[in-house]
Image (cartoon, rainbow, N blue to C red):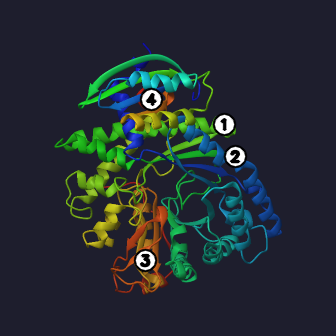
Amino acid sequence: MPATSHRIIVTVIGKDRVGIIAGVSAVLAGAGANILDISQSVMDDFFVMIMMVDIEHAGLPFAELKARLNAKGEEMGLKIDAQHEDVFKYMHRI
Amino acid sequence: MSASRYSPQEIVETIRMVQMENLDIRTITMGISLRDCAHEDLAVASRKAYDKVCRLAGGLVRAGEDIAAQYGIPVINKRISVTPVALVAESSRADSFVPMAEALDRAAREVGVNFLGGFSALVQKGTTRGDATLVASIPEALARTERVCASVNVGTTKAGINMDAVALMGRTIVETARLTADRDGLGCAKLVVFCNAVEDNPFMAGAFHGVGEPECVLNVGVSGPGAVLRAIEKEGQADIGALAATIKRTAFKVTRMGELVGRAASERLGVPFGIVDLSLAPTPAQGDSVARILETMGLERVGTHGSTAALALLNDAVKKGGAMASSHVGGLSGAFIPVSEDIGMIEAAGMGALTFDKLEAMTCVCSVGLDMIAIPGDTPAETIAAIIADEAAIGMINRKTTAVRVIPAPGKKEGDMVEFGGLLGRAPVMAVHRESSAAFIARGGRIPAPLQALNN
């Protein structure tokens, strides 16, 4: 059923550079969101970092957090996005 | 490790579908029964209908926006369908149902939805007094309201085709165009003539809340031509079987989003979840085109030989993928081929690669019919009726929904451009046959229901 999860998946796509994790972590910490897991890989010559984040105790709505992450991405020259875990669960698992 | 539940490929695919391929929830449509709003005084019936729509749909737009924010997937339209108004308004002795259309228009504006469907009548076997009043009210209702959509079902496989109603709808379309001539006949873009209309379709302009439906229900329409296009592009030179498999997989994923959003909306509003309609519904946006999918399969332009086969393959694969993904797939589910709403169709029609007759052939295998086609403003009502009859015959014989939504653009001739604006797009005026069908239409009567065996 929807909305059972408080987890979101944050993706960072772009060229690898120093300070990506620090930058994204700072935004998440500022929002009271807890990072559960980080993985990174290279796909089609792009650096892809994926974070599983718990926002149950976050102090701001998801849409607001997403906007802050988008803004951070623009600042760092990366594409940063966040999506609710249920979206992936529904799309890729039955 | 929790993030490793999903592979990076899966995660990136989802992000790409939403951000770059226009994957969205096209519509959340709330179906509302107005059967309990009938009253011998139409003013009372209209007030009851207004109150009920406002009461049940008051939270619809907010719920759609909240869900879009929660899941990060755009929910483009929030809409309402109601019981065919002919059934609701018939108890009154009113000689026009326009006041009820106006009441529903006010309700739609009040709750913030952009369209409300169901100014409708089901006349496949014959016409009651209320049906006749409704059809007579359509031109004025569509001219005087902004958000109300009308539809009339003139045939079914079980009942045959009501040719008197077909003739009447030809005249009704002409009159609707005349009353909205200042807007290029825009009223006709809100009027659909069906054969085998479905009762749970969430897509406009043909949505209505069928008589077998519950008190209130949520139906979700998902789209995603962009996602299918990209998946096919990635397949490169794959053979047709591989293409079909790719389309199925993509349709599955897109439909799952509809299932997710439908369940969330249903829970939030306390209204039962009806169906997911997976229709590849194009928009005029670049990359959101069904025509481009067919062209990517290897056709130089949509409308050339091979287009019907390519569309048949696409339509069937979409249905198969969608059917697996949701516990209740319904509505129209397939590929729409509206001309004015699809950049590839607009181009092909403009250069003459796509003709009216080829479109008719393609409707034999797509999910609906002749949709959003501008035709010359001087097209006789009997010719439009004959277009409807042809399309209804295709639906009747093939046991599928077909529809006609043509716009005889006032003052326009073949090759002119008609601008409807927004999601309705723009269309080049397409040629229709000039030879008369009037004597055939003038016969009236009914086309008998077809034999359902001996199909060879």
> Which residue is under mark 3?
B386
Q: Marks 3 and 1: which is nearer the front?
A: 1
Mark 4 or mark 3, which is nearer to you? 4
Q: Chain of mark 3?
A: B
Q: Secondary structure at mark 1?
A: helix
Alpha carbons under labels 1 and 2: distance apart: 9 Å
In the image, residue B295 sits, relative to residue B119, either above or below, namely above
Q: Crowding at label 2, few (<14), some or many (≥20) Cα neighbours within 10 Å?
A: some
Circle 2/circle 4 CB separation < 8 Å: no
Which residue was labeled with disc 4?
A: A88
* Placement of A7 over or under B380, stated as above or below: above
- Label 1: chain? B
Do labels 1 and 2 touch, CB within 8 Å? Answer: yes
Local packing at callout 3 (Cα closer than 10 Å; few below 14, some 14-19, many 20+) is many
Chain of the residue where label 4 is placed in the rendered structure: A
Compared across the picture, whether A56 is left or right of B33 comes to: left
**Residues at marks 3 and 1 on the same chain:** yes
